[in-house]
Structure formats: C-alpha cells, structure tokens
Image (tube, rainbow, N blue to C red):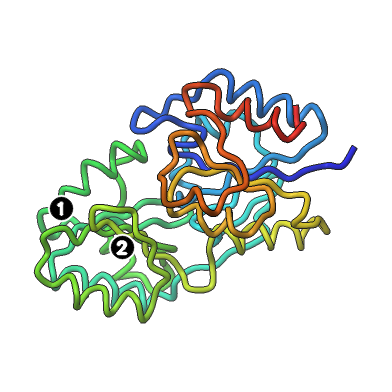
Amino acid sequence: MNRKLIFFDIDGTIAVEPTGEIPDSAKEAIKKAKENGHLVFINTGRTFSGIPKTITELNFDGYVCGCGTHIYFQGKKIKESVIPNDQCVETVKILRKYQVYAFYEADQGIYFDFSYPNPFLEMGKKIFGTQGKSIDEIIEDQTKTFDKCLISLKENPAADSVMEYFRQHYYCISRGDDVWEMTQKSCNKGTGIQEVCAYLGADLEDCLAVGDSENDLDMLKAVKNSIAMGNARPSILPYCSYVTADILDDGIYHALQHYDII
C-alpha cells in the first residue's frame, strides 16, 4: 500500500462553524484512514493553544499550526517560528494607535488588548474557549512573542495606513468582510506540508489537502490532490481537483472514499 499524508483544515472542514460540532462520519473516516496505514494531520490557522480538545481527541499523527509556524509530529515539535518581540511590540502599537479590533495568537496562548473597546474579545474567547492573556505581557517581557494576529478593518478610517504596514511586514490573508489573518511571510499552510514531507522523507505526490476557505489556498495549491468541501467558498474551487459533499453531508467520508483511502 502506498501510504498517504492527509492534511485537514479545522473550521468548516472537520468542525462545523460556529458550533464546533464534528460529524460522526468525519470521525469514522479519520479513524479508518489511520487503521489503513495512512498519516492524518491537522493543518490550521489556529495556533496549537487554540485547537479544541474535540480535535486532539481524534489522535492525529501531527499538527501544522498557525499557518505553518509550528509543526508537531507524534508529540514532538519539529518546527518553530515566531515573530521577534520588537516586531510584536511595534505591531501592537500600530493597532492601538488606530484602535483596530484584533487578537494575537501564540503557540501556547491567545492574547487580547484590553486597553480599548474591542468586540473581538468576546468572539475570541468563544472561539478559543479561553479568557486569554493580556498583550501587555508581550510588551513588558522581551522573551515573549506571538506567531500571528487576526484583525478587522471594517469601517476603520485608517484601513489603508494599517494595510500598508502589514503588507510590508506580514503575509496578509483576506478572510472576507475586511477581516485579515496576518501571518509570517516565510510560513503558510503550504510550506507546512513541504516541511512535514521533508522531515518524513515523503513525496508531495502522496499528499492530500482538504479545506473550505481562502486561508486554505496555500495548502490546496501545494498538492496534486486538493479537496474542497461542498460548503467551500467558491473562490477556492478553481484550485481544487475534487469537490466533496458538505461537511454535514459526510463530506470528509466521501472524499476519503473517492481517493481510496478508506
């Protein structure tokens, strides 16, 4: 048997948004893939601290986290990339100056800025199931950093100035409705797959990627067998070799059947 490496996004792919529900058929498909000798990975924009227990309980072989900034395989961290503390501090100051709604994601925690009104606070707490840490910890401690941030520029009059800064220093991924995922320029979900392959001595030809939105494009473009969920954003479909059923219509199960994984 030719072992495959299968990379899954979380939100909208394995877990229903916004409830986080994981269809039983997806759980069964992942279990069967492992039993058949294949390796299964999470490949997510979430940092490791933001991955819910319902996902880790499925016993994935590895995790590509934070858009490729941290990679784990069988419990061992094989890649780590953080934003230098001075750039973290500069970024926070820019967002504070223009009162941009934001939260900051690190491998071991989620940071919020409590210094001005921020509707992202409650959303972030709900998404990640945490009260979060204060971003002041990173400002005051040069040993602390974050890996990426999520910002909303909707109706912000300084949007152009903010984007000019981020385009210079970050890889900017549009999440729609003027929400942006700001990640490290050297890392993305596609480089994460490449680094897993290099670590395991595997071939990209033997990789599959499954996603549903624009922040999955890098991994979908990186592999030959790219799968879009039936509920995927239309903009990603031209980059996918197969479109499966919706997440609640056993989309994961059908996709793995289509590729003879199960």
Q: Is 183 in front, or is 237?
A: 237
- The residue singled out by tag 2 in the image is 137
Give the percent coordinates (x, y) of residue 65: 53, 52
* Mark 1 residue crowding within 10 angstroms, few (<14) / some (14–19) / many (20+): some
Q: Quadrant of residue 29?
A: top right
* 250 with respect to 12 (left or right): right
Q: Earlier in the sequence, mark 1 or mark 2?
A: 1
Q: Quadrant of residue 1?
A: top right
Are the residues flagged by discs 1 and 2 in contact, CB closer than 8 Å?
no
Q: Is 219 in front, or is 35?
A: 219
Residue at 36% from the left image edge and 81% from the top image edge: 168
* Mark 2 residue crowding within 10 angstroms, few (<14) / some (14–19) / many (20+): few
Residue at 28% from the left image edge and 79% from the top image edge: 165
Residue kind at label 2, given as amino acid type: Glu
Q: Quadrant of residue 155?
A: bottom left
* 188 with respect to 140 (left or right): right
**On screen, residue 248 above or below 51:** above
Numbered circles on residues, count:
2
Q: Secondary structure at mark 1?
A: loop
